Amino acid sequence: MRNVGPDSEQDCLLQEALAVVKEQAWLMKQSIANNNMRETLKHASNMICELRTGTLEPKTYYELYMQVFTELQSLALYFQDTQRHGMKLSALYESVQHAGNIIPRLYLLITVGAGFIQSKEAPAKEILTDLTELCKGVQHPIRGLFLRYYLSQCCKDKLPDTGSPYEGIEGGNVYDAIDFILNNFTEANRLWIRLNHQGSLRDRARRERERHDLRVLVGNNLIRLSQLDGMDKNIYVSVVLPKLLDHVVSCQDTMAQQYLLDCIIQVFPDEYHLATLDSLLTTCSKTNSAVDLKPIIVNLMNRLAVYVSSNPGSVPQDLDVFELFRSHLDRMLDRSENDAAANAASSQSSGEGRGRGSRSSLASLIDIMGAYLGFTITLYPDRQDHLQSIHAALARMLDRQLSGGAVKIQPDEKACFSMVDLLSKPMEELGLSCMDNLSEAYSNVYRYLTPQTQAHCGVGMVNALLMCEHPERQVIDNVNRLQSFMTLLRPLISEDYASDATEAATDQCNLAKICHLIRESDANTDLELQLLSVMRQHLGHGSPAKLTVTLVPVVYRAMKLAPKVRTLELQHTRLFNSTKKAFQFIYKTLDAYGSHCLLGGGPTAAMQTLKMWLDAAAVAGYVEVNLYGEGAFESICCEFINRALGTYEDDITDSPKQSACIPLFVGALLGPAGQALTVEDYDATSTTITQHAAKLLQRSDQCRQILCCADMFWNPVLPRDRWDSRRVLECLQRCLKIAERILESGLGNDSTPEDLDRMDISETTGVSLFVDVLDRYIFYFNKGNEQVLPSHISSLISLCEEHVKFALESANPSSTASGAKNPLLDSHDTAHTASASSGIVAVKAHLAATIAYVRKLKEDPDYREKYRTLDLSGTSSRAKVASA
């Protein structure tokens, strides 16, 4: 036999009940159509009888209830149509009370009673009181809760509220409406609590789930209460809230107390809460010890914070909200600590030790303190003494909870995340100004955290500062504040706290962004350099991998600072730090960066170090050339370049990276750094760079980088008399020799397919290099280099055409005139042939464009005389080259 699970069994029971409801509802509607009141009541009673079941769980019972509720709407309309059925509602009200079962009787009575009130044949107050008392006849928790929910739904728009048509001397007023709702609420809550005391202990978890599902039936009454038009602050303070709070305290049920307090805070206006804050907090202190006050207090504080910030001046002058919260929170914390101590003693007696429950309670307490802190910042943004007292209370609480610091908060606990949120709030709202009074308080709290937890708190504080809602408070302009803040971030800088490398890298990037918050000033450069010194001092304690990220912005901010210092010196401003001290700071920082990062900063650390040395040289050159350095900064510039060369020689061993460094050196000398160097230093440096280019591993790299080095000997930023046309020509000729060697690297009879691959690549590369050298010949010829002659260009064009033609024939052997086949190439894979052919085609197009450019220059009036002796008669026409 197939096993049927609980859900399937509930579905079967529900479907059976729904089938009966639909059948009786159809018969009821037929009787209504026939205007047969007796049969209508009979079928309606049979339909409602399905709600007497005790086998359905709350969720499925709710579905059944909603079906019955929908069908009863047709019956309610029929009852109200007195002209149709010919009965007075008073008689009908008496008649339905004779139903045999109490559940159908009361549902019918409520349905008729709602119409009775609407007809105004009887005072609303009397009918509502009668219905409330009669509903006490159902004491089954689930059936009684849904019955009272039906009463609330049917009568919600028929209460004697202020301005309601049912208000009057006999019909009642808003106080009677409040009494009706409060009575219904009280009875519903008692039924809800009673559900917890039925059944055996092993079903307790199931009953808790059922109660959780049914809680809205109780809270619905509070929603109705808050929606009364006659409800104002005075009535709420004097009548409604005292009764609600008395019931909350007296019910002595943990779930009910927590849910009802949360409902009260949610449904009533924040203005009312501000007026009754003392009563609310006092009630929170009187609840059961098992009640989790965290969501209640946090929600209350957050709502009040939003309300006060949106309505300035809403707090009464005679109300000290901070002191009120402080006194009540102290009592709550004392109670929580006493409960925790009792639980700990109980656990020790049973041999369990300190459990998860106490740590979870600690997280809740920290969350409450965090909400209190945020609430205080919103209400009193200028009262940092309040923040000090909160942190002092936090430290005392941690001291008692964590055995005086013998036990520390671990990074994987909930309390860690709560602590991160708490310590970040002042940064997000106040920026570093909070360090004036809170640095010592933060240090006291840090005693109860492990270094890894401290690092997580540092991450939170950094992110909070970067996301500060007030940009003017983000700016760092105070050395003491920055010193205190960076001291708190020391664990983030020095500890390995994150298991995820990507997360750790993101955190370090955010830490580096702090440097950009330092205030820039053209007048107070001393302060800026002091702040950068503090940053360097603390960031220097990081690992090589962290330094590659965090020290870089410090270096570049110092580079940006040096010209400003020099400008102030030229204006005869009295400064504590001179321009040379700024460059000393850059030098020491870069030296520390290089010495640490090259040991463990990864493959990119050496390249980054070299780039920063060259950038520093460019800044020194700019100061020397453009800010009247008078030779004072030439040696500094030269030293920076020499350190870059030293990094290249000692730490960059990968050939592609070496090749990528040569243009960086050349670019540096083509800028202010080249202008600042003396003739001897410039010649020595340019020669060294060219020698490094000639020693590259790949010949193609040698050719390209020597071609790049030629620019150093024809430097447009130097005086014309320092241009060396002979050295330029030597570089070009050396490049041609290297390209020729690449083409001459032939293959023997025992060549392998791999050798053929290299042949295809080298041939394409060699031809491409010839065309590149041709371009540079034309460039220097246009610039007036007297060593480059028209005959050089003519010969080189012819040579390039020959190489292109030969390369095309090699790549396409079937196109040769003889039609002979090369057996070596026949064995080569066709994919390699196609690749080589496409490469040569690209080189051919490049050559065609170059020749077209030369022809255009020959026709240009500005260059016609220069190119007059250039003979292109031996070259192919543009169309012929393009179609080859």
Image: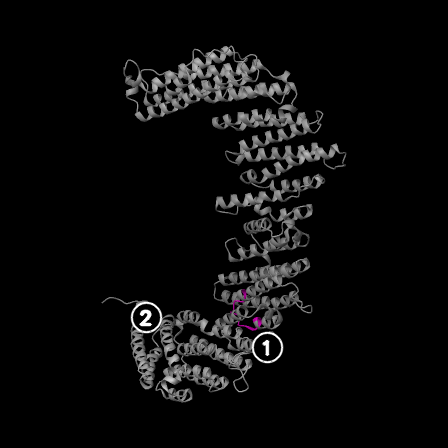
Query: Height in image: 364 above or below 70?
Result: above
Q: Is the magenta stretch mostly helix, strand or loop?
A: loop
Q: In which quarter of the image is the C terminus?
A: top left
Query: Height in image: 72 above or below 877?
Result: below
User: Which residue reaches farthest left?
Assistant: 1
Residue 727 position in % (x across, y down): 56, 15
Q: What secondary structure is found at the residue carrying circle 2?
A: helix
Q: What residue type is labelled 1?
A: Ile
**Magenta-tinted stretch:** 284-294
Q: Can residue 279 be seen in this view?
A: yes
Residue 94 or residue 765, whichever sits in front: 94
Residue 80 position in % (x across, y down): 41, 82
Task: Tell me the residue that label 1 is attached to.
Answer: 235
Task: Tell me the residue that label 2 is attached to.
Answer: 10
User: Which residue occupies 53% across, 19% down?
Assistant: 779
Q: Quadrant of residue 518?
A: top right
Q: In which quarter of the image is residue 112?
A: bottom left
Question: Horizontal placement of 478 versus 130: left or right?
Answer: right
Q: Quadrant of residue 698?
A: top left
Residue 617 position in % (x across, y down): 62, 29
Gap in angstroms between the C-alphas marked 1 and 2: 45 Å
User: Which residue occupies 63% across, 42% down?
Assistant: 535
Structural crowding at the residue carrying mark 1, measured as other residues with C-alpha within 10 Å and reported as few (<14), some (14–19) or many (≥20): some
Q: What secondary structure is found at the residue carrying circle 1?
A: helix
Query: Height in image: 781 above or below 75?
Result: above
Q: In which quarter of the image is the N terminus?
A: bottom left
Question: Horizontal placement of 372 versus 218: left or right?
Answer: right
Q: What residue type is labelled 2?
A: Gln
